[in-house]
Image: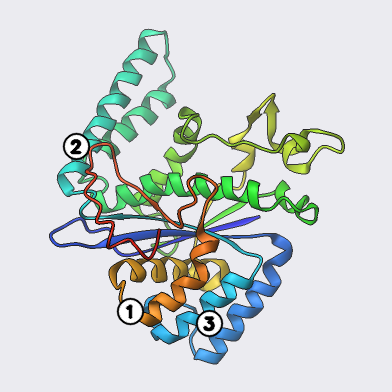
Amino acid sequence: MRLHFDESGDFAFGAGFDAYVQAAVICAERDLPKIEAFVAAEQDRLGVDELHGVALPDEELVPICAYVEASPLEILAQATDTNALTEGQITEHRLGQAVRLKENLEQWKAAGGESESIESWYWLHINRAGLPQRVSNREYVQADFLVRLIHGALFKTIVRFLDDRYRDDLADFHFILDGKLPGKLAAGEKVLNALLLPAMGSNQDRFALVTPLEWQQEPVHPFHAKFSSGENTLSLNRIFEHGLRFEDSRDHAGLQLADVVAYVTRRAILDPDDDVVYRAYSHIRDKLRTERGGQAISLVRYETGTDNIDDARYRLVL
């Protein structure tokens, strides 16, 4: 399976209202050639080297979203905004994270921990969480919230690709993100790369993964056979054996479609009365829905944030 991730908006939590969206496009390996063929045909038709939502005329977003709706792809999106989070609330959250990491480090040392590499890991992430000069609030929030989206996309993959023809596809996972810098990781990407598995492994309630019981019965499903590490336990190290791939969106049809999904969703939030944007979003709205709550998108914030969500502003997207 290939899980692609991109976002729309620059996550600048300054003055004035703005919304930011992160999206996932999930594609089975067997379906990838037809997805790539569609994107290549659209590139030729539009005379562009990639499908980038912000660069396309609004009316061209409609047929692309219509294709996503009719395709075997699964999609997911989450949003936050400047009313739900402020710079001060983000800083408060980060300082709290740094304090908790420092407490965990002291508890580990008190219990006899002596590994230099583990202590270095703790200090690295204490500094990344607590020092905005190391990682900006913008990059930190993007990385932190991507952990939630990656888990959500993995969960949706398990529950939506149940047909037997996808059995073999579910034995291998590639997590592909739009790289911000050529040839190296940006600061936020380093945070995500390092914190993803510890975060998912340490919070079993938020990041639970459940597979159908019949997958454990003979013949054992390839997903369960490869990734199970005991009764009702999955190995994250095996699921993420290929790591996170930060790559050029021009090389991946799935990343380009993730960009369009994120952009159209954000435009539907910011321009709720735009008829063309609404037509585009209406094609993907139902496909965005999740098994948890049934909303088309999740609204994410920190515990330090507010509940100041304008329901009217989100009326088209939820």
Quadrant (top left, top right, bottom left, bottom right) of the N terminus: bottom right
Instruction: Residue 300 in the image: state x and y as whole percent.
Output: 34, 48
How far apart are the two marked residues, 1 and 3, measured between alpha carbons?
16 Å
Secondary-structure class at tag 2: helix
Secondary-structure class at tag 3: helix
Disc 1 vs disc 2: which is toward the camera? 1
> Which amino acid lies under the numbered mark 2 shown in the image of this protein?
Glu
**Residue position marked by numbered label 1 in the rendering:** 274
Q: Residue furthest left?
A: 15
**Residue position marked by numbered label 3 in the rendering:** 63
- Is there CB contact under 8 Å for labels 2 and 3? no
Q: Earlier in the sequence, mark 1 or mark 3?
A: 3
Seen at 44% across and 44% down, the residue is 148
**Residue position marked by numbered label 2 in the rendering:** 92
Q: Is residue 261 left or right of 123 when viewed as pictured?
A: right
Numbered label attached to residue 183: none
